[in-house]
């Protein structure tokens, strides 16, 4: 199918086309003059005042018109060609008027179009200048005849009317030409802007993470961006490689849901997997235009949707945490205090004391959940200071062993003799290490054995690091990839917020927290801290 030229292409070719028609009209003028002068119809021109001059002018004008017609395709010479051609037109018309006194009115009328064309194609000053030149030439020829030996019966009013007509037509044509050129320049700018916007929109759609498909009424894919092509599993990198393919051939379930949506049935919102190696997607459907047979299919990555839902959940938790603290922590404190008073009573039997211990433990666990949610909502700005990690870790272990009963478990430090300095907020560091140590003591043990947890301080390439290691069963690869997601936990007693909050606190201090697999068994959580000369944001 042949592509039709665009409006912009037509506008760009307009000056060349007008120049060609102007040259063609000049050739017609010269042809008419030569045909009348050198044919038996020469009597229609009346008396010829200077036959030799008339013949020479006619032959010259005919050759000049043909030459201008050949050069009319050179658009870059537009102004010189029109200017020279118009000046020659005026001179030839003046001389022809002198040689053919009976055809004066006709020649003057033919020149009127030349003046208008010059005003249309030339800049305003030159266009009006040609009109003035034509008026002066007409008046000069009349004056020459009146002052010479060849008086004419041509009335002065006719000369004045033609002169005024030249000036008026030249001015109006110049204004029209100026507006046409302004409109063309505006159209060129708008065309460039439209082309740029089209390319930008095309690039945005192509680079969108959301897959976009355009499907016609026959379920044939008309357009697919890169994300959609990747999700469909065709292995293409371009956006048009899936064009023309029937949707049921590569995604039968998606085509079925699209047909259900077109028929007005309830849309199935369960995620689906279009290809084995790609994530699940959530399809959405929409009409391209009202009444159009084309349908838009949006393929949203379900993992992205899940992360958005988690973000909304975390935001809601942050807003709810303040009232949660007042509504839960105060009753918990009262219950805990009442349990302590009951434990001091001598009338409580041993079986009931065990129940009191359970109540006390559950109060502490609930209070820990509240503290985790509050820590998630606070997001306090870090106040870093220089810390000797060796000294700090040694003190942390001593205080932890005194305040927490670890029974047969062990908590040790592995530090060197050389000081390891870091720039970190001590409050955040306390929370991070506490979370890591508690997780190691709770989950880092083999069945029937005691937990053995070590805190190692070392330095690599001037970056201070802290490892919290245990000798437990380790963490499976599939679980390790989800460790730092909020609310993800493998324990029925956990909240899934501890490691997430620890990583957020690390980020607040320009530090990193990651899980490192231990080849010999066990787990390792490594915290990389900024050095003492690191600049933290204010």
Image: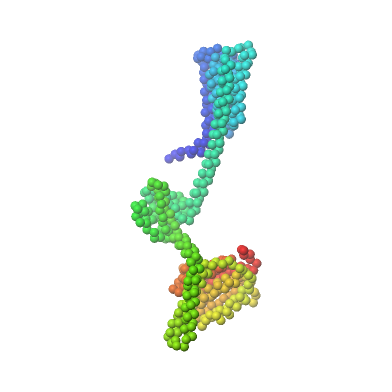
In the picture, the quarter occupied by the C terminus is bottom right
Q: Is residue 48 visible?
A: yes
From the viewer's side, name the closer residue of 316 and 64.
316
Residue 450 lies, in percent from the top left, at 50, 81
The vertical placement of 356 against 273, above or below, is below
Residue 333 lies, in percent from the top left, at 49, 77
Instruction: Give the image quarter of residue 52.
Output: top right
The vertical placement of 273 against 7, above or below, is below
Q: Is residue 93 visible?
A: no
In the picture, the quarter occupied by the N terminus is top left
Q: Identify the residue at horizontal 57%, vertical 12% (top origin).
A: 153
Q: Identify the residue at horizontal 48%, vertical 79% (top origin).
A: 336
Question: For this view, does 407 lie left or right of residue 275?
Answer: right
Residue 462 lies, in percent from the top left, at 63, 68
From the viewer's side, name the closer residue of 504 and 470.
504
Q: Residue furthest top?
A: 149
**Colour scheme in the image?**
rainbow
The vertical placement of 315 against 104, above or below, is below
Residue 106 lies, in percent from the top left, at 53, 19
Q: Identify the residue at horizontal 58%, vertical 22% (top origin).
A: 163
Q: Identify the residue at horizontal 53%, vertical 77% (top origin).
A: 453
Query: How many numbered circles does the render carry?
Result: 0
The vertical placement of 486 against 107, above or below, is below
């Amino acid at each position: 199918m042949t592509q039709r030229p665009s409006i912009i292409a037509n506008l760009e070719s307009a000056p060349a086309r007008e120049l060609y028609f102007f040259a063609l009209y000049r050739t017609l003028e010269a042809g008419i003059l030569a045909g009348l002068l050198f044919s038996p119809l020469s009597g229609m021109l009346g008396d010829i005042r200077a036959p030799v001059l008339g013949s020479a002018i006619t032959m010259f004008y005919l050759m000049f018109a043909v030459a201008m017609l050949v050069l009319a395709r050179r658009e870059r010479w537009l102004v010189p060609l029109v200017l020279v051609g118009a000046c020659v037109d005026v001179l030839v018309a003046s001389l022809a008027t002198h040689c053919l006194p009976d055809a004066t009115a006709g020649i003057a009328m033919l020149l009127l179009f030349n003046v208008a064309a010059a005003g249309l194609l030339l800049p305003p000053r030159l266009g009006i200048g040609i009109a003035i030149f034509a008026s002066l030439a007409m008046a000069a020829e009349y004056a020459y005849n009146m002052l010479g030996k060849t008086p004419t019966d041509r009335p002065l009013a006719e000369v004045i009317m033609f002169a005024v007509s030249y000036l008026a037509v030249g001015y109006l044509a110049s204004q029209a030409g100026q507006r046409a050129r302004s409109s063309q320049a505006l159209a060129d700018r708008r065309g460039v802007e439209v082309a740029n916007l089209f390319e930008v929109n095309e690039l945005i759609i192509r680079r969108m993470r959301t897959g976009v498909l355009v499907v016609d009424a026959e379920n044939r894919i008309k357009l697919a961006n890169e994300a959609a092509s990747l999700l469909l599993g065709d292995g293409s990198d371009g956006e048009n490689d899936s064009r023309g393919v029937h949707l049921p051939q590569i995604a039968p379930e998606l085509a079925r849901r699209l047909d259900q949506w077109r028929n007005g049935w309830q849309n199935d919102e369960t995620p689906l997997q279009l290809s084995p190696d790609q994530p699940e997607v959530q399809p959405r459907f929409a009409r391209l235009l009202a009444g159009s047979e084309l349908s838009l299919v949006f393929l949203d990555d379900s993992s992205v949707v899940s992360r958005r839902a988690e973000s909304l959940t975390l935001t809601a938790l942050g807003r709810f945490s303040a009232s949660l603290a007042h509504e839960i922590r105060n009753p918990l404190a009262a219950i805990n205090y009442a349990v302590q008073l009951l434990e001091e009573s001598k009338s409580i039997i041993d079986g009931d004391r065990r129940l009191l211990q359970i109540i006390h433990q559950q109060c502490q666990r609930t209070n820990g959940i509240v503290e985790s949610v509050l820590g998630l909502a606070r997001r306090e700005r870090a106040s870093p200071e220089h810390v000797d990690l060796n000294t700090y870790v040694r003190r942390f272990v001593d205080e932890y062993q005194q305040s927490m009963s670890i029974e047969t478990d062990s908590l040790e430090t592995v530090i060197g003799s050389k000081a390891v300095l870091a720039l970190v907020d001590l409050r955040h560091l306390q929370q991070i290490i506490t979370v890591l140590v508690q997780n190691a003591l709770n989950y880092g043990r083999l069945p029937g054995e005691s937990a053995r947890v070590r805190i190692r301080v070392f330095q690599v390439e001037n970056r201070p690091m802290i490892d919290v290691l245990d000798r437990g069963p380790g963490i499976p690869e599939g679980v390790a990839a989800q460790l730092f997601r909020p609310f993800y936990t493998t324990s029925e007693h956990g909240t899934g917020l501890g490691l997430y909050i620890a990583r957020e606190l690390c980020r607040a201090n320009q530090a990193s927290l990651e899980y490192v697999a231990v080849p010999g068994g066990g787990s390792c959580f490594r915290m990389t801290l900024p050095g003492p000369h690191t600049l933290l944001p204010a």
